[in-house]
């Protein structure tokens, strides 16, 4: 009898243990056994379901008002959905709490992003500077500070911040530094402070001797004070240093020389340039135009045909031909080339930003649309 009791006790214990084991295994296999609203929110963020994420984050902070990360994410989502006011309210409410240093940095970053989105640059700057006062090598903060300087046209500060970033990254980008100096100069020129503006352009050239816009702006700045000879000097220097951008000076040089009554100098400038760069079609056409203006039609015609052999679709050369044949009285040929021009005009591609596609007739060093530097091709 006792044996029977013992056996049934053993069986009961074994069955119980098996049941416990099965229950345990079953529990382990169910994924996310504790699906809290916070986990659901994180999953929704990952899958891009912002509406659910917002709802679940609200639930989370309602249940657990100590979950700082949930508040941070809630604010960030509000900002992304365009509700900057409420994003700021959520993030600001965190600043009065006791926070770890990591959390404090995250809150300040979130606030900086909110203020940037609201275009409140002074406040964004304060948040970023607070991060930097704790950790002056915080790369994100430095890069954000740089974009604030760009937005607010604080170009000298932009230079200093860029230098700090480059030091951290072990890189050097003199081209961008020089462009910042040019921007600083332009701001001064606009205010009528031409002398200090030119000091900035010269600083730019000391950083990057091939900084085309610095030469251009130096000349323009001298022109605003009627110092045409000085202006011409810098534009000629541009042709010498960066002949591939010489065409940017053509109109300026022609105007200045014309005002000085020395148009003949242009012939020499173009001739020198063509000698140095025989394939520079822009220089060739400018030369043809001058020749044509001076009545030297036959030489102009010969140069046009020479240019068209190199680039048959060239608009400038065809336009020159129209004018040259007309000047010679051969209007039938002039009309023939004129009718061809429209076709070619449609094909002509201007300069284009490789980031956003913005088009311009001139190469730009900073895209006015997407604000990226050196994206023009
Ligand atoms: Zn662009």
Image (cartoon, rainbow, N blue to C red):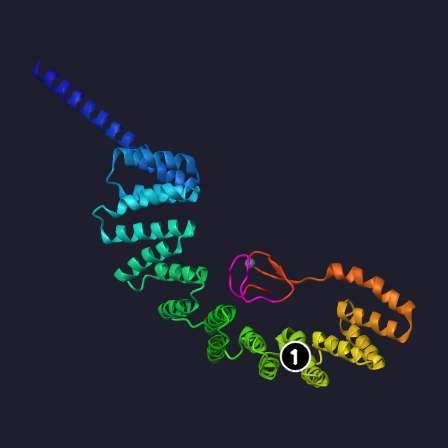
Q: Quadrant of the C terminus?
A: bottom right
Q: Is residue 367 magenta?
A: yes
Pointer 1: what residue? Answer: 256
Q: Nearer the viewer, residue 50 or 93?
A: 93
Q: Is residue 243 magenta?
A: no
Q: Is residue 67 visible?
A: yes
Numbered marks: total: 1
Residue positioned 31% across, 42% down in the render:
71
Q: Quadrant of the N terminus?
A: top left
Q: Position of residue 218 (x, y in %)?
A: 54, 77
* Image-quadrant location for residue 58: top left
Q: Position of residue 82 (x, y in %)?
A: 44, 42
Residue positioned 42% across, 38% down in the render:
50
* Image-quadrant location for residue 77: top left
Range of residues picked out in magenta: 363-374
* Mark 1 residue element: helix
Q: Is residue 32 visible?
A: no
Write down which quadrant ligand 1 falls in: bottom right
Mark 1 C-beta closer than 8 Å to ligand 1: no
Crowd tier of the residue under label 1, counting other residues whose Cα lies within 10 Å: few below 14, some 14–19, many 20 or above: many
Which SS type dominates the magenta stretch?
loop
Q: Position of residue 68 (x, y in %)?
A: 27, 43
Residue positioned 27% across, 50% down in the render:
103
Residue positioned 80% across, 78% down in the render:
292
* Image-quadrant location for residue 237: bottom right
Direction from residue 199 to residue 94 in the image, left or right: left
Direction from residue 312 to residue 190 in the image, left or right: left
């Amino acid at each position: 009898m006792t044996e029977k009791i013992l056996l049934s006790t053993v069986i009961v214990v074994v069955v119980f243990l098996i049941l416990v084991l099965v229950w345990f295994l079953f529990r382990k296999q169910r994924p996310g056994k504790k699906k809290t609203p916070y986990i659901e929110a994180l999953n929704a963020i990952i899958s891009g379901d912002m509406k659910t994420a917002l709802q679940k984050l609200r639930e989370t902070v309602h249940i657990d008002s100590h979950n700082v990360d949930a508040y941070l994410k809630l604010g960030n989502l509000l900002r992304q959905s365009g509700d900057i006011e409420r994003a700021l309210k959520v993030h600001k409410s965190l600043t009065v709490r006791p926070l770890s240093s990591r959390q404090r940095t995250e809150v300040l970053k979130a606030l900086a992003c909110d203020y940037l989105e609201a275009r409140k640059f002074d406040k964004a700057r304060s948040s970023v500077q607070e991060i930097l006062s704790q950790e002056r090598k915080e790369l994100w903060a430095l890069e954000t500070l740089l974009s604030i300087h760009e937005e607010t046209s604080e170009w000298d500060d932009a230079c200093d911040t860029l230098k700090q970033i480059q030091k951290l990254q072990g890189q050097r980008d003199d081209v961008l530094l020089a462009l910042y100096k040019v921007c600083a100069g332009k701001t001064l020129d606009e205010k009528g402070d031409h002398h200090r503006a030119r000091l900035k352009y010269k600083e730019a050239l000391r950083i990057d001797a091939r900084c085309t816009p610095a030469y251009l702006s130096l000349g323009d700045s001298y022109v605003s004070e009627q110092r045409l000879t000085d202006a011409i000097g810098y534009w000629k220097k541009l042709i010498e240093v960066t002949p591939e951008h010489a065409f940017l000076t053509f109109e300026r040089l022609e105007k200045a020389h014309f005002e000085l009554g020395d148009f003949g100098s242009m012939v020499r400038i173009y001739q020198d340039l063509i000698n140095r760069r025989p394939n520079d079609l822009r220089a060739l056409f400018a030369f043809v135009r001058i020749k044509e203006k001076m009545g030297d039609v036959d030489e102009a015609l010969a140069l046009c045909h020479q240019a068209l052999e190199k680039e048959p679709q060239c608009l400038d050369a065809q336009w020159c031909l129209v004018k040259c044949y007309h000047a010679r009285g051969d209007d039938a040929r002039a009309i023939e080339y004129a009718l061809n021009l429209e076709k070619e005009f449609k094909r002509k591609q201007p300069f284009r930003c490789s980031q956003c596609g913005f088009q311009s007739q001139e190469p730009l060093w900073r895209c006015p649309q997407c604000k990226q530097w050196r994206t023009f091709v």
